[in-house]
Structure formats: structure tokens, C-alpha cells
Amino acid sequence: MKIRIFSTFIFLFTMAQFATATVADDRLRIYTVNYPLQYFAQRIAGEHAEVVFPAPPAIDPAFWTPDVQTVGAYQDADLILLNGANYAKWVNKVSLPRRRLVNTSAGFAENYIDTGSGAEHSHGSGAAHAHAGVAFTTWLDLQQAVLQADAIRQAIIKKRPQLKAEVDNNFARLEGDLLALDAELKSIIAGKQNQAILASHPVYQYLARRYGVTLHSVMWEPDEYPGPSQWQALANLAQGHAATWMLWEGEPATESVKQLKKMGIGSIVFDPCANLPAQGDFLSVMKNNLAALKQAF
């Protein structure tokens, strides 16, 4: 009798382990080209997907190029989430399975912002590049971010139609969070659209258009102290637009902050959050951005 009970226990335990392994094996493997897409996808898919953004920390994913092994991991993924707007140019140089590609901004491609030509520069030790052609930080217009999240929702449901109800519910919660941020941003800037703001880098175009920010950009890096010609150019720009605040992608160098203060210009960090933040997540970073932006408005 004891042997029979023990055998039954072993059988049930084995079946449970098999069921657990089956659920794990059935998870979607999703690769993304930036952190916002990873955040959206993980919130929408929940436990039903492993969402991977493999770029190293502290680099701009827009100009990162993965190695051969990492490209192979993208090729093996069930879904590859692209940002569109000519983001992650490496995508156009490798062979990726077209049926697994999801251009999350394709639905509003006609609203991409043309940036024209731009001066070539580099981010720290990164390769030289220019912010020319199309503005690519599409998610900083939070209504566009909702559309990108919805494209992810549709792609996941297409792969796992049996999860539609759960995926739709997860998306609805994410949508609510993004639209709350959108409403708060509009409220912060309402009635103050003529107040000029400087930006250390040309990455806030969609933010400026959506929320009516009068924005003028230079080409500075947070961790590099600008040269004399850059300071003179900024002085000319600030005088022409009476700007008293500058937005930075990351924490600016102390000497830069001091010099700006002498010019009557304060510094605000507004992190586009393209890469995984050191602390918190996309939502908390955006809330911090909004809190900082209130200083200027």
C-alpha cells in the first residue's frame, strides 16, 4: 500500500514538474531594441514572455550595434520589437526574420519629425554619428507611446490568441499609466508654451510637439565640459530666446551647471529612458522627469 501511495506521489510530482516546464517553455521570447519597448512588452505579456533588451548599460541604444552572437539571439526570438523612425540603424544591416519583426511606430509613421541634417559627434567613447533624418525618441510623446504599446499588444495576441483577455487587461493598465503622465505633462505646460527652453541634445522633438514646448537644442554631452565656441553659441541662442532652463539627458557635469548658472540658466535632468535605468523603471523615471520639469514651468 505504501509503495502504491509513494508511486502515485512520484507520478503527480513528475506531472507537476512537466506542467511547469511546459508553461515555461511556452513563454514567448521577445527581443527589443530599446528599454521602453522592453518595459511595455513585459507589462503587457506578464509571466507569459521573457522580454530581453541586450544592450549594455550606460550607452545610447539608438547608436549601439550588437555583436554576432547577440544578432543570432535576435534572429531566434519569437518577436523582435523595433522602434521605427530609423532607430537602431544596425537592424537595416543584418538579416532578421521579417515575420517576427514588429515596427511599433508604423501606425504613425506619417507623423515622424524630419530633423534635416545634423553635425557629426560622438557620445563619450562611442562611434561618431549625426542626429539627421528622422527624430527617433517617439515615446516622449506619451500618446505615441500608447500606440507603440498597442502594437505590441496586437503582436502578442497574434502569437498567443488564447491570452487575449489577460493581455488586453495588462495593456489597459499600462495605457492608463501612460495617459496619466500625458495629462500631467499637458497640465504642467498649459498656458506657458511661449516660455523658451534649451536642450543639451536634439532628442526632445516629440515632447516639444505634443506638449507645445518652445525648445532650442544644442549638441552637448552631460559628462563633457563644452568648449569656448560652444559656450558662445549657447550665449547667442539663449539671448535670442530668453531661455532660463536647459534640459539634460543625464546628470550634467558640475562645472557645466556652475557656468550655466552664471548665465542665468538652470539645469534640469529629463531622462528619455532609452536604456535600463540604474534605479526604478520607465514609469518612475518619467514621474521624476515631470517633477523636475515643474521647476521650469
Image (spheres, rainbow, N blue to C red):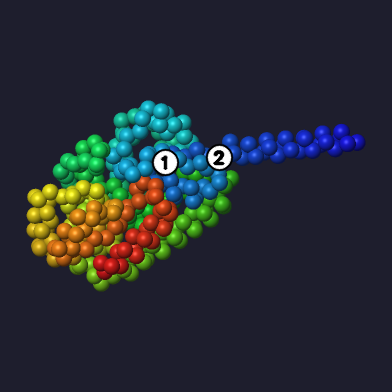
Image point (8%, 54%), residue name: 232
Residue 205 seen? no
Task: Give 91 or 239, whichever is nearer the viewer.
Answer: 239
Vertical position of residue 40 compared to residue 236: above or below: above
- Counting other residues with Cα less than 10 Å from the Cα at mark 1, is it few (<14), some (14-19), or many (20 or more)? many
Which amino acid, mark 2?
Arg
Mark with earlier residue (1, 2) = 2
Q: Nearer the viewer, mark 1 or mark 2?
A: 1
- In the image, is 188 to the left or to the right of 20? left
Image point (35%, 51%), residue name: 273
**Which residue appears farthest toward the bottom when viewing the image?**
191
x and y percentages locating residue 126 in the rendered image: 26, 38
Mark 1, residue position = 53
Task: Give 184 or 254, whichever is nearer the viewer.
Answer: 254
Residue 67 seen? yes
Vertical position of residue 63 compared to residue 285: above or below: above
Label 1 SS: loop
Task: Give 279 or 160, whichever is nearer the viewer.
Answer: 279
x and y percentages locating residue 272 in the rendered image: 32, 52
Q: CA distance from mark 1 to mark 2?
A: 16 Å
- In the image, is 233 to the left or to the right of 272? left
Image point (41%, 64%), residue name: 180
Mark 2, residue position = 27
Q: Quadrant of the C terminus?
A: bottom left
